């Protein structure tokens, strides 16, 4: 059985245009904190340290929120979120990755614990609430190495996970926050 190195690298995907939101999603207020910063703070409260943020259109707007994080610019975000993930993965060596879209809810201790338990016997761990998958997703170092060989235009992460079938742990959690998708202004 695989033991999860603690902690993984947090990768926050924030290269979208935020068209439905009307302003950068990472700047959305979540209990008094910009969402991009809330992701980092929640991860660090769990003992996490290494954070990679991939943005593009709002690189300058997000840069001041990249607290002690590696902030990368996706040169062509029109290729989709998988291209942003691969941009981040090119900076990762022998580590598991906790991948979170910026418009998802920040990680909670319960979700992190269950994802970590799921990864012990799988290549990836996806949280579910009442059977529906959500975020963040925990990727094993072995899967990260496989993903690093793919082209940013040849697939999407959900397609890769679907092909892996039983090698993906779908872990049921009690928090419906894993389903949150902050796409519209509140």
Image: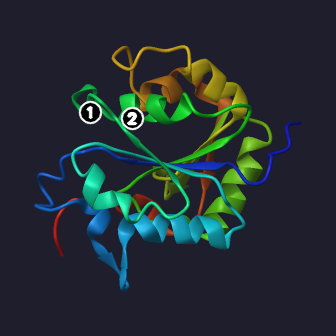
73 sits to left or right of 44: left
Q: Is residue 84 above or below residue 4?
A: above
Q: Is disc 2 placed on a helix, strand or loop?
A: helix
Inter-mark Cα distance, 1 to 2 = 7 Å
Q: Is residue 138 above or below residue 142?
A: below
Estimate how packed mark 1 is, as few (under 14), some (14 to 19) or many (20 or more) residues with alpha carbons within 10 Å: many
Where is the N terminus found, in terms of image quarters?
A: top right
Q: At 53% across and 55% down in the image, what residue appears?
A: 69
* Whole-percent x, y for residue 20 in the image: 12, 55
Mark 1 vs mark 2: which is more N-terminal?
Answer: 1
Front-most of residues 80 and 94: 94
**Towards the viewer: 82 or 117:** 82
Q: Which mark is residue 84?
A: 2
The reply to whether dot 1 and dot 2 touch (C-beta < 8 Å) is yes
Residue located beneath label 1 in the image: 77
Looking at the image, which residue sits at the far right? 1
| Residue sitting at x 71%, y 61% | 113
Residue furthest to the bottom in view is: 32
Q: Residue at x 50, y 64 (%)?
A: 67
């Amino acid at each position: 059985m695989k033991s999860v190195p603690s902690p993984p690298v947090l990768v926050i995907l924030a290269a979208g245009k935020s068209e439905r939101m009307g302003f950068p999603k990472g700047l959305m207020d979540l209990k008094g904190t910009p969402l991009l910063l809330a992701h980092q703070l929640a991860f660090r409260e769990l003992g996490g340290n290494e954070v990679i943020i991939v943005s593009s259109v709002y690189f300058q707007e997000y840069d001041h929120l990249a607290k002690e994080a590696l902030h990368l610019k996706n040169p062509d975000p029109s290729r989709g979120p998988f291209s942003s993930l691969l941009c981040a993965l090119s900076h990762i060596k022998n580590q598991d990755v906790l991948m979170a879209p910026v418009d998802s809810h920040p990680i909670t201790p319960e979700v992190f614990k269950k994802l970590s338990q799921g990864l012990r016997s799988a290549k990836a761990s996806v949280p579910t609430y009442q059977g529906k998958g959500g975020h963040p997703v925990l990727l094993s170092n072995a899967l990260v190495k496989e993903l690093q060989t793919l082209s940013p235009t040849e697939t999407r992460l959900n397609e890769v996970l679907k092909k892996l079938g039983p090698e993906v742990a779908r872990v049921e959690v009690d928090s419906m926050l894993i389903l949150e998708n902050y796409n519209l202004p509140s």
